[in-house]
């Protein structure tokens, strides 16, 4: 069914991820992965494969769940089976979350009255204008155009200097060493600064960014007076013939301009070392958006739809109208899934 609906390559990639993504999730319940299956007798009609996470919503931590691979057998679609899967999954959890949706699932989330709080803003910064121009205009035009583009970028999107960054050291985390309890202390400190964020303790982060089998991330740590003040998770990939640097996750106190500044400065030097043409990241958090803008990131049209439902008496309708302190990133759910 997966091959029929998503294609052969996507099915193979899903197999390569499966054990890690479902079985090894530290929030996976003892009875096994949370994959909800619609059956008629022995016949499988569809599934909703989900990722349980601990979700901090205002001052409470809820049993949250990212909905990921949902499908109904093609000849049975539009008969109400998908709706029953969505609603059944939603009943088992305190928060059901859909990110980066296809047209059919986005339409269904809206039809079933999930809160539509997306799209999650996308931010992009040019690192190498020559490489981008070469892709669009060819080599000759880019040779002449690149210096002009550099000047224009410098004038229009200046990268502000990081103030107060002297006391902060940014270093690459040894890829062989796991993330430690300093990440839990960072989480405890910064969690109250957000209204909505997936819990990022060291167990979750090691699973998400260290034990993932199909990709290697570079993690940079910002350290101030011996204590972890923030981190950033990066990787590069190729999209439409252009080398793209993905800021998959970034975390610090959103008002700690110096730490964000130092981390983002390091993203740019990392991008140059890896011949990346453009850096890209996602977040709903407006304070982090401002940190990105100060380093020359521009907000782009975003394809990342986001629908949410929360079952808790501590949030009301107003909660969903102001998402400026919600940190949802490309590292959430299974957005970064290209094997
Ligand atoms: C999403 C999916 C699971 C829904 O299952 P389903 O059994 O068809 O859903 P239901 O019959 O309960 O609900 C149908 C509603 O879903 C939405 N929908 C389903 N297919 C759609 C399509 N091709 N385009 C737009 N909306 C669609 C509509 O709101 C539709 O209501 P309508 O028939 O009144 O217009 C199914 O369409 C599917 O397998 N899609 C392909 C895989 C996919 O895109 N997965 C999501 C990955 S993020």
Image: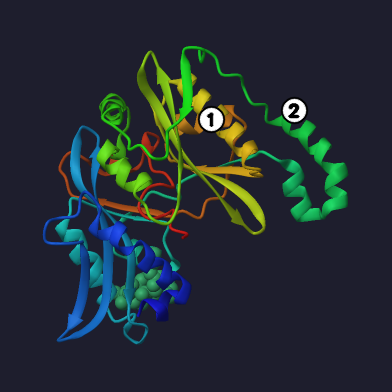
Mark 1 against mark 2, which lies toward the viewer? 1
Image-quadrant location for residue 210:
top left
Q: Residue drawn 32% across and 35% down?
A: 179
Local SS, label 2: helix
- For label 2, the residue is 155
Chain-order first, disc 1 or disc 2:
2
The answer, for residue 107, to whether it is visible in the render is: no
Q: In the orientation shown, which residue stands out farthest toward the front?
A: 176
Tell me the residue at 72%/48% (across/down).
132
Residue 76, position in %: x, y? 31, 84
Residue located at (36% from left, 23% from top) = 228
Percent position (x, y) of residue 154?
A: 73, 29
Choose top left, top right, bottom left or bottom right for residue 110: bottom left
- Mark 2, ligand 1, within 8 Å: the answer is no
Instruction: Write the residue at 23% across / 70% down.
Output: 85
Q: Quadrant of ligand 1?
A: bottom left
Q: In the rendered picture of this protein, how many numbered marks are placed on residues?
A: 2
For disc 1, the neighbor class at 10 Å (few under 14, some 14 to 19, many from 20) is many
Q: In this figure, which residue is indicated by the disc labeled 1?
A: 264
Q: Position of residue 199 (x, y in %)?
A: 27, 39
Q: CA distance from mark 1 to mark 2?
A: 19 Å
Please state the horizontal and vertical placement of residue 16, each as a whole percent of the image: 38, 65
Residue 326 is left or right of residue 220, and the answer is left
Q: Which is nearer the eye, 15 or 53?
A: 15
Judging depth in this view, the residue of 6 and 122 nearest the camera is: 6
The secondary element bearing badge 1 is classed as helix
Local crowd size for mark 2, using a 10 Å CA cut-off: few (<14), some (14–19), many (≥20): few
Q: Is residue 82 left or right of residue 252?
A: left
Disc assigned to residue 254 = none
């Amino acid at each position: 069914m997966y091959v029929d609906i998503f294609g052969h390559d996507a099915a193979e990639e899903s197999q390569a991820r499966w054990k890690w993504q479902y079985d090894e999730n530290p929030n996976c319940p003892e009875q096994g992965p949370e994959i909800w299956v619609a059956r008629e007798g022995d016949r499988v009609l569809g599934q909703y494969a989900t990722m349980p996470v601990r979700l901090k919503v205002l001052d409470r931590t809820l049993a949250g769940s990212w909905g990921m691979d949902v499908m109904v057998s093609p000849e049975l679609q539009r008969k109400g089976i998908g709706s029953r899967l969505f609603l059944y999954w939603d009943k088992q959890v305190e928060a059901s979350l859909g990110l980066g949706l296809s047209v059919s699932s986005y339409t269904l989330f809206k039809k079933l009255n999930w809160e539509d709080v997306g799209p999650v803003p996308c931010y992009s910064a040019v690192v190498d204008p020559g490489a981008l121009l070469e892709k669009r205009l060819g080599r000759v035009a880019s040779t002449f155009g690149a210096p002009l583009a550099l000047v224009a970028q410098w004038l229009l999107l200046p990268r502000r200097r990081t103030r107060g960054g002297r006391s902060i050291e940014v270093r690459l985390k040894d890829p062989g060493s796991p993330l430690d309890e300093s990440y839990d202390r960072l989480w405890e400190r910064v969690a109250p600064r957000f209204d909505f964020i997936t819990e990022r303790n060291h167990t979750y982060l090691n699973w998400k960014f260290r034990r993932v089998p199909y990709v290697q991330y570079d993690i940079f740590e910002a350290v101030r007076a011996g204590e972890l003040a923030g981190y950033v998770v990066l990787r590069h990939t190729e999209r439409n013939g252009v080398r793209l640097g993905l800021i998959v996750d970034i975390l610090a106190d959103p008002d700690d301009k110096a730490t964000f500044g130092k981390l983002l400065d390091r993203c740019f030097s990392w991008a140059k070392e890896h011949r990346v043409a453009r850096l890209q990241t996602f977040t709903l958090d407006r304070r982090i958006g401002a940190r990105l803008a100060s380093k020359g990131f521009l907000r782009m049209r975003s394809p990342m739809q986001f629908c949410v439902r929360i079952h808790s008496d501590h949030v009301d309708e107003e909660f969903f109208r102001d998402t400026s302190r919600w940190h949802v990133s490309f590292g959430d759910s299974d957005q970064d899934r290209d094997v």
